[in-house]
Image (cartoon, helix red, strand yellow):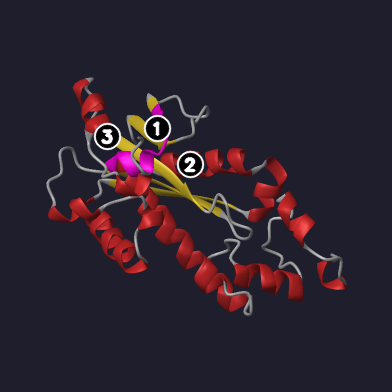
Amino acid sequence: MSTRKHDTKPNFYEEFRFQADGYRLIAGVDEAGRGCLAGPVVAAAVILPNNPDYLWLQDVRDSKILTAKQRERLFLNIVQIALAIGIGTVSHEDVDSIGIVPASQLAMTQAVVQLSPAADSLLIDYLKLDAITLPQKSITHGDALCYSIACASIVAKITRDRMMQELDVQYPGYGLCRNKGYGTREHWHSIEEKGLLPIHRRSFCHLQYRLKPTMANVE
């Protein structure tokens, strides 16, 4: 029987493999907001110290299975000890224009480029970054298996959640501070009742199928 993702604790196995090959600035890379109906996709790249020994690391998991309070606490810890953090953001317009996978890759590339000091190798959740020539490894469920990627997932999630909270002030009545742009029942109800916001991703075909044709949806 395969291990369920929420039962898996990250480790430093992949980081140690890169270190054995002489790499020292290993960045974990992940994104947040890939499956949302609204808002940007946000990526983070995080370089942790080599062989860090902190008790709080025992609590690090894929950001999606942590509570909001756990993420906030771990985010502060990560920011305090990270050698470098980079953030990349790709708008909902670009998601519509180029597609969600290329948009996720673009956000990840932006995050890696922002790192200072620069990374010498990458551990990436699921995707590959063809625009980056650094040695890299794509890991399926990397945010559940690899500490660097898990930390990047937390940073990306917190960063994007704060953006969505700001958008909730700009666009009240859609519950963005709670649903963060994901397709919750509340969010769907608001869309069907009030129509699309400027920040909704038009290219997501399930939006088109779910929505009733009303003047509120006509630009």
Within 10 Å of the Cα at label 3, are there few (<14), some (14-19), or many (20+) other Cα atoms?
many
Of 113 and 63, the residue lying toward us: 63
Q: Is residue 54 visible?
A: yes
Q: Which residue is mark 3?
A: 25
Question: In which quadrant will I find the N terminus?
Answer: top left
Q: Is residue 67 left or right of residue 200?
A: left
Residue under numbered circle 2: 108
Q: Which residue is pictured at 69% across the width and 53% down the height?
A: 93
Q: Position of residue 152 (x, y in %)?
A: 36, 48
Q: Secondary structure at mark 1?
A: strand
Q: Position of residue 32 (x, y in %)?
A: 48, 52
The kind of residue on which mark 3 rests is: Leu
Q: Is residue 85 visible to the viewer in this orientation of the structure?
A: no
Compare marks 1 and 2 and give the one earlier in the sequence. 2
Q: Nearer the viewer, residue 195 or 164?
A: 195
Task: Say which quarter of the image contains residue 71.
Answer: bottom left
The residues colored magenta run 137-147
